[in-house]
Image (cartoon, rainbow, N blue to C red):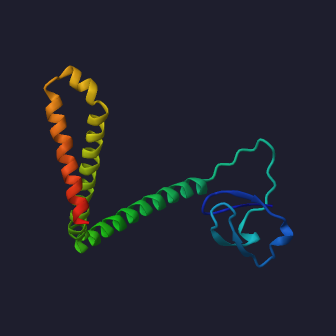
Amino acid sequence: MIITCPNCNKQFKIDNSLIPDEGRDLQCGSCNHIWFYNIQEKNNEVLELKQEIFSEDIEIKTENKEDKIEKKQQSEEIIKTEINIKKKEKNPTKLKKTENTGSKFFSYLIVFIISFVALIILLDTLKTPLINVFPGLEIMLFNLFETLQDIKLFIIDLI
């Protein structure tokens, strides 16, 4: 016997001996919908090959599905708006801004220090070609490196 799920219209072939005369609960293997099925509910006429079946039930079921889909979408939208309202009421953005201000400052400071060290290494590496192109740059680079050496010694003395 072929049984159709009333929820998703998936058809299953089931042995007649598995369903007693008083009926039983069935579960769809596709959508997990559970419904009570009674053999007497269905018309047990034998269908001939090439016989066309037109049923208003199928049209009604598709309309019901469309209605269910619309209701689900509306309920999802309502839930999303409620969640957004609750989030706005709690104002977690103000707390995050105060917590992130300090960490942003240290992040920028670390990036600045790393960039400055990279620039110094680059200048030291390309010192000779730069002096050949810009002869007046030699005194400035010498003073820069002497100043950095003094800062290094100062920090070592502090430690």
Q: Residue at x 28, y 45 (%)?
A: 117
Residue 96 coordinates in the image, percent (x, y):
25, 67
Residue 92 coordinates in the image, percent (x, y):
26, 70
Q: Is residue 70 left or right of residue 106?
A: right
Q: Which part of the image, by quadrant, shows the N terminus?
A: bottom right
Which residue is at the far top?
133
Residue 77 coordinates in the image, percent (x, y):
36, 62
Q: Residue at x 24, y 45 (%)?
A: 116
Q: Residue at x 28, y 36 (%)?
A: 124
Q: Residue at x 23, y 21 (%)?
A: 132
Name the one closer to the observer, 48 or 115.
115
Name the one closer to the observer, 123 or 39.
123
Residue 4 coordinates in the image, percent (x, y):
69, 60
Q: Which part of the image, by quadrant, shows the C terminus?
A: bottom left
Whether 145 is drawn above or below 72: the answer is above
Q: Is residue 29 left or right of residue 122?
A: right
Whether 149 is drawn above or below 132: the answer is below
Whether 47 is drawn above or below 137: the answer is below
Q: Is residue 82 left or right of residue 94?
A: right
Name the one closer to the observer, 47 or 94.
94
